[in-house]
Amino acid sequence: MKTLITLLLMLAFNAMIMAQSVPNWTKTESQGIDTYTLHDVLAAGNAVILDFMATWCPPCVTSTPALESIWQDYGMGTKKLYIFGMDVDNTETNAQINAFKATYGATYPSFQKCSSDYGYYDANYSPNPGYIPLFVLLIPNITDPGASTSYWTNVGWSAPVETALRNALLSAGFDTTSVASGITDMDGIAQISVYPNPVTDRATVSINQVTTSDIEVELFNSIGQKVSTLYDGQIVGGTTENLDIDVAWLSPGIYYLKVKAEQTSKVIKLNVLQ
């Protein structure tokens, strides 16, 4: 009986959440490069994860790299999923947010001064009000973005929470060809990471190789023009190759690293700052 009552309360809570509207906003991300309007993103058929966080939040240190893994698995905005970092501490500057992102490898868009947004979602969506990180997964209503559904919410972070979030995306019909554990779908490669990102002078591309493969790393600008071939060679299985990249000569802006292995490739967004 107790279990039934608990289940009914959970269903009632979820129904209350889904009945709430999704307020629109337009914000420029912390790098000052791109501007996003939430309803436009939803109207384009994208699911959205709102990550209400702060740079001083201990669980955010763990959740941020995990969200970055999801962001990359879903093609960094190319596979119908956006992740937005929403800093709830209005005293924090864009410079602080960017430093936090660089430390923990986040490339998904983040915004400052989101306390009022947090107040709305905390009051209407949070299962445990008053705490961060708060995550809200919005499933789009294309014809009426304001009526989009809060499909999944959680406060706090752990490995089971990441699994639950990935499963929620899958159950809502948002799939990706990447393996859900975070292992990439590239031949013989277990993991690729780039740090720091954003970068001002030098970056490291770290490739964790499982089997011996020929690897090529190319750099493209924001309009798809090839800028440079950074690496072209063989990486031995069971090793990690750390490629040191000089970007000081590049103009500030968005670039893309294309890592090719055998018959597959992966693209990673790189933010180059002044």
Image (cartoon, rainbow, N blue to C red):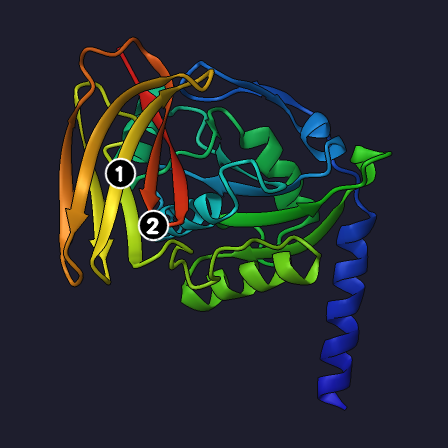
Residue 99 on image: x %, y %:
27, 28
The local secondary structure at tag 1 comes to strand
Q: Nearer the viewer, residue 21 or 267?
A: 267
Measured as percent of width and height from the top left, residue 197 is found at 29, 31
- Position of 7 with respect to 167 (left or right) is right
Instruction: Report the amino acid beneath label 1.
Output: Glu
Q: Residue furthest right?
A: 143
Q: Quadrant of residue 199?
A: top left
Count of all numbered marks drawn on residues in the image: 2
Marks 1/2 in contact by CB < 8 Å: the verdict is no
Q: Is residue 216 above or below residue 62?
A: above
**Residue 216, numbered circle:** 1
Q: Secondary structure at mark 2?
A: loop
Q: Which residue is mark 2?
A: 262
The amino acid on which the numbered mark 2 sits, given as a three-letter code, is Glu
- Can residue 130 be seen by looking at this rendering? no
